[in-house]
Image (cartoon, rainbow, N blue to C red):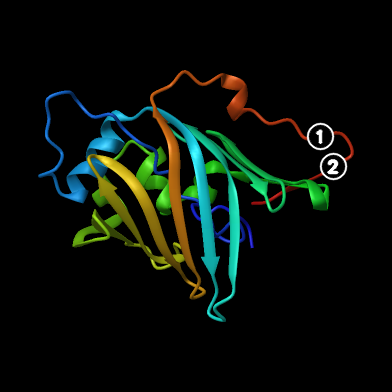
Amino acid sequence: MSSLIFLRQPLWAGLLLSCALALAPGVSHAVDTAQVQLQTFVDQVKSATGEFQQEQKGPDGKARSQTGTFAFQRPGKFRWQVRKPYAQLIVSDGQHVYQYDPDLAQVTQRQAGQAVGASPAALLFGSGSLDDAFNVQSQPDRDGLQWLRAVPKTPDAGFTYVDIGFADGLPKRLELLDAFGQTTHIQFMALKANPGIPASQFQFAVPEGVDLVKMN
Protein backbone atom coordinates (compact mmCIF):
# COMPACT_ATOMS: atom_id res chain seq x y z
CA MET A 1 0.00 0.00 0.00
CA SER A 2 1.09 3.53 -0.68
CA SER A 3 1.65 6.25 1.87
CA LEU A 4 -0.90 8.80 0.75
CA ILE A 5 -4.35 8.59 2.28
CA PHE A 6 -5.58 11.52 0.25
CA LEU A 7 -5.55 9.64 -3.00
CA ARG A 8 -7.85 6.97 -4.28
CA GLN A 9 -6.52 3.45 -4.69
CA PRO A 10 -3.82 2.45 -5.21
CA LEU A 11 -2.34 5.71 -3.87
CA TRP A 12 -3.58 5.12 -0.35
CA ALA A 13 -2.98 4.95 3.33
CA GLY A 14 -0.84 7.38 5.17
CA LEU A 15 -1.10 11.17 4.88
CA LEU A 16 -3.28 14.05 5.81
CA LEU A 17 -1.44 17.30 5.23
CA SER A 18 -3.24 18.97 8.09
CA CYS A 19 -0.76 21.81 8.70
CA ALA A 20 -0.76 24.43 11.43
CA LEU A 21 -2.32 27.86 11.07
CA ALA A 22 -1.51 30.88 13.20
CA LEU A 23 -4.99 32.35 13.12
CA ALA A 24 -5.85 36.05 13.34
CA PRO A 25 -4.41 37.82 16.41
CA GLY A 26 -6.86 38.58 19.18
CA VAL A 27 -9.22 35.73 18.35
CA SER A 28 -9.72 33.14 21.07
CA HIS A 29 -9.80 29.64 19.60
CA ALA A 30 -10.35 27.86 22.88
CA VAL A 31 -14.11 28.34 22.41
CA ASP A 32 -14.16 27.50 18.70
CA THR A 33 -15.41 24.09 17.69
CA ALA A 34 -13.14 21.85 15.65
CA GLN A 35 -15.40 22.54 12.65
CA VAL A 36 -14.78 26.28 12.93
CA GLN A 37 -11.05 25.72 13.29
CA LEU A 38 -10.92 23.50 10.21
CA GLN A 39 -12.91 25.92 8.07
CA THR A 40 -10.69 28.80 9.18
CA PHE A 41 -7.63 26.73 8.34
CA VAL A 42 -8.95 25.99 4.86
CA ASP A 43 -9.87 29.64 4.32
CA GLN A 44 -6.65 31.23 5.60
CA VAL A 45 -3.70 28.87 5.20
CA LYS A 46 -2.23 29.12 1.71
CA SER A 47 0.87 27.00 2.32
CA ALA A 48 2.55 24.99 5.07
CA THR A 49 5.48 22.71 5.84
CA GLY A 50 6.16 20.22 8.59
CA GLU A 51 7.10 16.73 9.70
CA PHE A 52 4.94 13.69 10.36
CA GLN A 53 4.92 10.42 12.25
CA GLN A 54 2.44 7.86 11.01
CA GLU A 55 1.26 4.46 12.17
CA GLN A 56 -1.06 2.25 10.17
CA LYS A 57 -2.76 -0.87 11.49
CA GLY A 58 -4.57 -3.47 9.43
CA PRO A 59 -7.39 -5.75 10.56
CA ASP A 60 -4.71 -8.21 11.66
CA GLY A 61 -3.44 -5.67 14.21
CA LYS A 62 0.02 -5.45 12.69
CA ALA A 63 1.46 -1.92 12.78
CA ARG A 64 3.49 -0.21 10.08
CA SER A 65 5.22 3.09 10.80
CA GLN A 66 6.57 5.90 8.63
CA THR A 67 8.24 9.24 9.22
CA GLY A 68 9.02 12.07 6.85
CA THR A 69 8.32 15.64 5.77
CA PHE A 70 5.62 17.43 3.82
CA ALA A 71 4.75 20.73 2.17
CA PHE A 72 1.66 22.06 0.45
CA GLN A 73 0.52 25.14 -1.41
CA ARG A 74 -3.09 25.83 -2.18
CA PRO A 75 -4.71 24.95 -4.49
CA GLY A 76 -3.62 21.43 -5.24
CA LYS A 77 0.16 21.45 -4.88
CA PHE A 78 1.82 19.21 -2.32
CA ARG A 79 4.93 17.21 -1.54
CA TRP A 80 4.91 14.16 0.76
CA GLN A 81 8.30 12.57 1.35
CA VAL A 82 8.71 9.36 3.32
CA ARG A 83 12.24 9.01 4.72
CA LYS A 84 11.92 5.98 7.02
CA PRO A 85 11.65 2.99 6.91
CA TYR A 86 11.99 3.35 3.13
CA ALA A 87 12.16 6.20 0.62
CA GLN A 88 9.08 7.31 -1.27
CA LEU A 89 8.04 10.62 -2.81
CA ILE A 90 4.62 11.88 -3.84
CA VAL A 91 4.41 15.25 -5.60
CA SER A 92 1.47 17.17 -7.07
CA ASP A 93 2.07 20.17 -9.33
CA GLY A 94 -1.64 20.94 -9.39
CA GLN A 95 -2.13 19.17 -12.73
CA HIS A 96 -0.62 15.74 -12.11
CA VAL A 97 0.27 13.62 -9.09
CA TYR A 98 3.53 11.66 -9.27
CA GLN A 99 4.36 8.77 -6.96
CA TYR A 100 8.01 7.76 -7.09
CA ASP A 101 9.14 4.47 -5.54
CA PRO A 102 12.95 4.26 -5.81
CA ASP A 103 13.02 0.59 -4.80
CA LEU A 104 10.76 -0.25 -7.74
CA ALA A 105 12.47 2.22 -10.09
CA GLN A 106 8.97 3.35 -11.07
CA VAL A 107 6.94 6.56 -11.22
CA THR A 108 3.14 6.51 -11.41
CA GLN A 109 1.42 9.57 -12.90
CA ARG A 110 -2.24 10.47 -12.43
CA GLN A 111 -4.41 13.47 -13.19
CA ALA A 112 -4.63 15.52 -10.00
CA GLY A 113 -8.42 15.72 -10.13
CA GLN A 114 -8.75 11.95 -10.48
CA ALA A 115 -6.21 11.26 -7.74
CA VAL A 116 -7.58 13.62 -5.12
CA GLY A 117 -11.29 13.60 -5.91
CA ALA A 118 -13.57 13.54 -2.88
CA SER A 119 -10.76 12.57 -0.53
CA PRO A 120 -9.25 14.05 2.64
CA ALA A 121 -6.94 16.09 0.41
CA ALA A 122 -9.93 18.07 -0.79
CA LEU A 123 -10.40 19.32 2.77
CA LEU A 124 -7.00 20.96 2.73
CA PHE A 125 -5.82 21.56 -0.84
CA GLY A 126 -9.09 22.72 -2.33
CA SER A 127 -10.69 26.12 -2.10
CA GLY A 128 -14.39 25.23 -2.10
CA SER A 129 -16.87 24.66 0.68
CA LEU A 130 -16.27 21.64 2.88
CA ASP A 131 -19.96 20.82 2.59
CA ASP A 132 -19.59 20.13 -1.14
CA ALA A 133 -17.98 16.72 -0.64
CA PHE A 134 -18.21 15.93 3.09
CA ASN A 135 -20.61 15.69 5.97
CA VAL A 136 -18.67 17.29 8.83
CA GLN A 137 -19.73 16.76 12.43
CA SER A 138 -18.26 17.64 15.80
CA GLN A 139 -17.07 14.78 18.02
CA PRO A 140 -16.63 14.62 21.81
CA ASP A 141 -13.42 16.11 23.19
CA ARG A 142 -10.74 13.57 24.10
CA ASP A 143 -7.02 13.51 24.84
CA GLY A 144 -7.11 17.26 25.38
CA LEU A 145 -8.20 17.89 21.76
CA GLN A 146 -11.36 19.06 20.05
CA TRP A 147 -12.42 16.65 17.32
CA LEU A 148 -14.44 16.63 14.14
CA ARG A 149 -15.37 13.82 11.78
CA ALA A 150 -15.56 14.23 8.00
CA VAL A 151 -17.55 11.57 6.15
CA PRO A 152 -17.36 11.58 2.32
CA LYS A 153 -20.63 12.00 0.46
CA THR A 154 -19.49 9.80 -2.42
CA PRO A 155 -19.48 6.02 -1.84
CA ASP A 156 -16.24 5.46 -3.82
CA ALA A 157 -14.00 7.83 -1.86
CA GLY A 158 -11.95 4.90 -0.52
CA PHE A 159 -12.32 5.78 3.16
CA THR A 160 -15.12 5.61 5.70
CA TYR A 161 -14.27 8.70 7.74
CA VAL A 162 -11.41 10.88 8.91
CA ASP A 163 -11.21 12.41 12.40
CA ILE A 164 -9.07 15.50 13.00
CA GLY A 165 -8.09 16.66 16.50
CA PHE A 166 -7.45 20.36 17.14
CA ALA A 167 -5.94 22.35 19.98
CA ASP A 168 -5.64 26.16 20.07
CA GLY A 169 -6.56 26.43 16.42
CA LEU A 170 -3.99 23.87 15.26
CA PRO A 171 -4.62 20.39 13.85
CA LYS A 172 -2.60 18.01 15.99
CA ARG A 173 -3.70 14.49 15.08
CA LEU A 174 -5.47 12.57 12.38
CA GLU A 175 -7.28 9.23 12.65
CA LEU A 176 -8.61 7.62 9.49
CA LEU A 177 -10.55 4.43 8.80
CA ASP A 178 -10.24 3.31 5.19
CA ALA A 179 -12.43 1.04 3.11
CA PHE A 180 -10.19 -1.96 3.86
CA GLY A 181 -10.60 -1.75 7.64
CA GLN A 182 -7.15 -0.21 8.13
CA THR A 183 -6.69 2.60 10.64
CA THR A 184 -4.11 5.34 10.17
CA HIS A 185 -2.89 7.63 12.96
CA ILE A 186 -0.77 10.66 12.09
CA GLN A 187 0.90 13.15 14.40
CA PHE A 188 2.14 16.50 13.05
CA MET A 189 5.26 18.32 14.23
CA ALA A 190 7.34 21.41 13.41
CA LEU A 191 4.42 22.97 11.56
CA LYS A 192 4.96 26.29 9.78
CA ALA A 193 2.03 28.17 8.29
CA ASN A 194 2.27 30.27 5.13
CA PRO A 195 6.05 30.01 4.61
CA GLY A 196 7.73 30.82 1.33
CA ILE A 197 8.18 27.52 -0.53
CA PRO A 198 10.34 27.27 -3.68
CA ALA A 199 8.33 26.33 -6.77
CA SER A 200 10.76 23.47 -7.36
CA GLN A 201 9.29 21.63 -4.36
CA PHE A 202 6.14 20.99 -6.40
CA GLN A 203 7.85 20.04 -9.65
CA PHE A 204 8.87 16.53 -10.60
CA ALA A 205 11.15 15.15 -13.30
CA VAL A 206 11.30 11.40 -13.90
CA PRO A 207 14.82 10.21 -12.98
CA GLU A 208 16.90 8.62 -15.71
CA GLY A 209 16.40 4.87 -15.94
CA VAL A 210 13.07 4.97 -14.08
CA ASP A 211 9.86 3.68 -15.69
CA LEU A 212 6.92 6.09 -16.03
CA VAL A 213 3.44 4.56 -15.80
CA LYS A 214 0.58 6.89 -16.78
CA MET A 215 -2.76 6.02 -15.23
CA ASN A 216 -6.11 7.15 -16.64
Q: Identify residue type, mark 1.
A: Pro
- Judging depth in this view, the residue of 209 and 181 nearest the camera is 181
Q: Residue furthest bottom?
A: 60
Residue behind mark 1: 207
Residue 152: x %, y % from top left: 34, 61
- Judging depth in this view, the residue of 133 and 172 nearest the camera is 172
In the rendered view, does 205 fall on the left or right side of 29? right
At a point 89% along the width and 39% down the height, the residue shown is 209
> In the structure shown, which secondary structural element does the residue marked by tag 1 occupy?
loop
Q: Residue furthest front?
A: 144
Residue 206 against residue 149 in the figure, above or below: above
At a point 45% along the width and 60% down the height, the residue shown is 185
Q: Residues within 10 Å of mark 1 (few under 14, many from 20)?
A: few
In the rendered view, does 181 fall on the left or right side of 107? left
> In the structure shown, which secondary structural element does the residue marked by tag 2 occupy?
loop
On residue 210, which mark appears?
2
Residue 212 against residue 191 in the figure, above or below: below
Residue 121: x %, y % from top left: 43, 47
